[in-house]
Image (cartoon, rainbow, N blue to C red):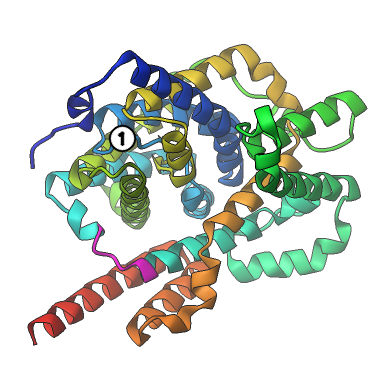
Amino acid sequence: MKFKPNILFSWKLYSQKLLFNDVMAGVSVGVIALPLSMAFAIASGLKPEVGIFTAIISSVIIAVFGGCKVQIGGPAGAFIVIVYGILHTYGLSNLLIATTFSGVLLFMMGMMGLGKFILLIPQTVIYGFTSGIAVLILLSQFKEFFGLSVQLPVDFFGILQQVYLHIHEFDALTLLMSVSCLILMYGWRHLKQYLGVFRGVPEILVVLIMSTSAVIYWHLSIETIGHQYGGIANHFPPWITLSFDIAGIYHLLVPILTLALLGAIESLLCARVADGLTHETHDPNQELMGQGMANFVVPFFGGMPATGTIARTVTNIKSGATSPISGIVHALTLLIIVNFLGFLAKDIPLACLAAILVYVALNMGDWHRLMGYKQYRVSDQISMLSVFILTVIFNLTISITVGIFWAILIHSYDKWKSQD
């Protein structure tokens, strides 16, 4: 398989006007990516700046070496649960090693032309994945959303048990902040058409500014990034030397496979959504190679797994992006914000970030398809519901394995029926 980044084919009929559109789109997405990147990192058990610098580094690499012109890379909600589990089971150093080798595996998948095979996974299996992950994200945010002091476990039933036992210990001010942010995001999104000049301001940015301003102005006694993390670093992270051995890699084989397969599915699903909006066609194998390079590099700067992100990619397209320049500008925007405005991050309430993740999860799940499962044929019903249940109750490793099994089985059956 030839290595042909899409950036090499992005300059036909390119103009100053398209450059301006790309720059404006990149700035818009960069502003949105700031709170999302921090929220995803914190929910994964990492420091907020890990998410930001992962977005900066991975976005540039994916833009330059990927197979989709308008793909925006960075931390994704789909990785929260698996990263949290790897971090607490294997430790930070092994998470970095697993991420690096998942990058190698992704690159090899692209080189072997497996990108098209990933695209054969039925939509119903994808619906089960995304809805299951959305439920897990919702559950993971109970602590910050309600202001609980108890540390929640990783497993589904453990979370439910601890929430049941400690929900009466909620902090009223934290809950008020969380609910207010959630209502404001939904309200802003539905009232945009009446907001005139402010209609282009994203709801996530609105709640970030207003909640942080409330904490500063009224000196609210509420958990913030400063209280828990001491703020965020305003300098580029140093190079980290990763040390490992063959026995250690074998020990991490399951996390590596899980990160690689989840990254492949998420990034190619995102690229497919981008194709529908731009009426262009991405190169799935080149996209996997670009994703692989990003995930190979970011751990050397302490970063977390990265992939194509649907919400930011869609925002990028709707903001007028036409080339990988927007992804590069998105990264530069984040870098500038961190360097010159990073000191303000210490006052961002964790309840606001929890509300943002709840908002993302509620919009991420394919709830209407899950509830309307009877509209699909029996094989699709079983595949969607089984993947959903396995994702929520067990873990992504099992659900991904079952999902791929269903993909092969359904595809083989369809092919056999077409020949019959």
Horizontally, is 338 left or right of 177 in the view?
left
What percent of the width, then of the height, locates residue 348? 73, 31
Q: Which residues are magenta?
A: 119-124
Name the magenta segment's main secondary structure.
Answer: loop
What percent of the width, then of the height, locates residue 328? 38, 22
Quarter-of-image position of residue 368: bottom right
Q: Residue at x 69, y 17 (%)?
A: 343
Q: Does 377 appear above or below 264?
A: below
Quarter placement of the C terminus: bottom left
Report whether residue 375 is seen.
yes
**Is 97 or 33 nearer to us in this picture?**
33
Q: Amino acid at mark 1?
A: Phe
Q: Does 338 appear above or below 219?
A: above
Q: Does 77 appear above or below 210?
A: below
Is residue 120 within the magenta segment? yes
Residue under label 1: 296
**Is 387 or 25 nearer to us in this picture?**
25
Horizontally, is 288 left or right of 366 in the view?
left
Is residue 8 within the magenta segment? no
Report whether residue 234 is seen.
no
Q: Residues within 10 Å of mark 1 (few under 14, many from 20)?
A: many
Q: Secondary structure at mark 1?
A: helix
Q: Residue at x 55, y 68 (%)?
A: 367
Q: Residue at x 82, y 44 (%)?
A: 177
Q: Residue at x 48, y 27 (%)?
A: 53
**Is 194 or 143 nearer to us in this picture?**
194
